[in-house]
Image (tube, rainbow, N blue to C red):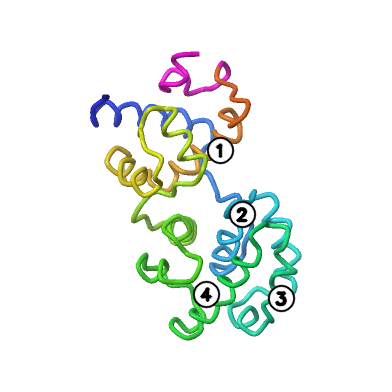
């Protein structure tokens, strides 16, 4: 089992390479307000960012504030977001989250982690994305399917539970990289380490990847 120090060294090498490759990364979801981003991240569960952006581009022309979503019939929200999948549950969460924001936070998205995760449909992943993207605040590391898959392949973690993965990564990733690290890994997952057809021989971090060393 590779020790924490060696994993830190491996992680820093990966960060250095991907930082040079991607520069300062940005969230792939389109938004103009913190609330729009919050809704977009809720919609992104089990859905591609490309699809979410198509849906929100049209939807935000009609409704894009907590007040508007809270007042809209649930069935109408379902119709607007249907193509993102799991639309009934997402619509219910968006409507309830909007109501909570109005009742507790005067319609504004709170910055604090414990307040964010208290909102309907908001877990640590969503809260980390919003806090990092809007306010450059980091209480943790966003772990989505790309981060889960790649960090296991690279050898930074040996876990399948996203909460455990986040805790392990927080031990080895310097805090100043907590926000950008997830962006780098997600972008690399889309570009080279594609789940069904990984391009290991072309991968820029192959020499620092446990899986890549075997190829």
Residue visible at 74% across and 71% down? Answer: 61
User: Gap in Å between the C-alphas at discs 4 and 1?
Assistant: 29 Å
Q: Mark 3 points at which residue?
A: 75
- Dot 3 surroundings within 10 Å: few (below 14), some, or many (20 or more)? few
Of badges 3 and 4, the one in the foreground is: 3
User: Gap in Å between the C-alphas at discs 4 and 2?
Assistant: 19 Å
Where residue 159 sits: x, y (%)?
Answer: 37, 38
- Looking at the rendered structure, the secondary structure element under dot 3 is helix
Residue visible at 65% across and 81% down? Answer: 68
Judge whether residue 212 is colored magenta. Answer: yes
User: Gap in Å between the C-alphas at discs 1 and 2?
Assistant: 13 Å
Where residue 102 sits: x, y (%)?
Answer: 51, 83
In the foreground, 147 or 33: 147
Q: Mark 1 points at which residue?
A: 187
Answer left or right for 194 relative to 136.
right
Where residue 172 sits: x, y (%)?
Answer: 29, 37
In the image, which residues are magenta? 201-215
Counting residues from the N terminus, which is met first, the one under dot 3 or under dot 1?
3
What secondary structure predominates along the stretch shown in magenta? Answer: helix
Counting residues from the N terminus, which is met first, the one under dot 4 or under dot 1?
4
């Amino acid at each position: 089992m590779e020790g924490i120090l060696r994993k830190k060294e491996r992680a820093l090498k990966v960060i250095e390479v991907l930082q040079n490759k991607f520069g300062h990364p940005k969230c792939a979801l389109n938004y103009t307000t913190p609330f729009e981003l919050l809704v977009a991240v809720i919609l992104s569960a089990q859905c591609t960012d490309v699809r979410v952006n198509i849906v929100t581009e049209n939807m935000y022309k009609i409704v894009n504030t907590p007040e508007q979503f809270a007042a809209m019939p649930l069935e109408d929200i379902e119709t607007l977001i249907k193509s993102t999948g799991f639309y009934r549950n997402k619509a219910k969460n968006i409507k309830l989250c909007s109501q909570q924001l109005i009742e507790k936070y005067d319609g504004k998205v709170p910055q604090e982690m414990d307040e964010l995760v208290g909102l309907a449909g908001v877990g640590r992943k969503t809260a980390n994305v919003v806090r990092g993207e809007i306010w450059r605040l980091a209480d943790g590391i966003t772990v989505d399917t790309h981060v889960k898959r790649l960090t296991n392949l690279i050898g930074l973690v040996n876990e399948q539970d996203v909460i455990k993965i986040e805790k392990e990564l927080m031990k080895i990733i310097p805090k100043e990289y907590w926000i950008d690290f997830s962006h780098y890994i997600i972008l690399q997952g889309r570009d080279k380490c594609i789940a069904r057809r990984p391009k290991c021989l072309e991968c820029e971090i192959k020499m620092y990847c446990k899986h890549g060393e075997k190829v």
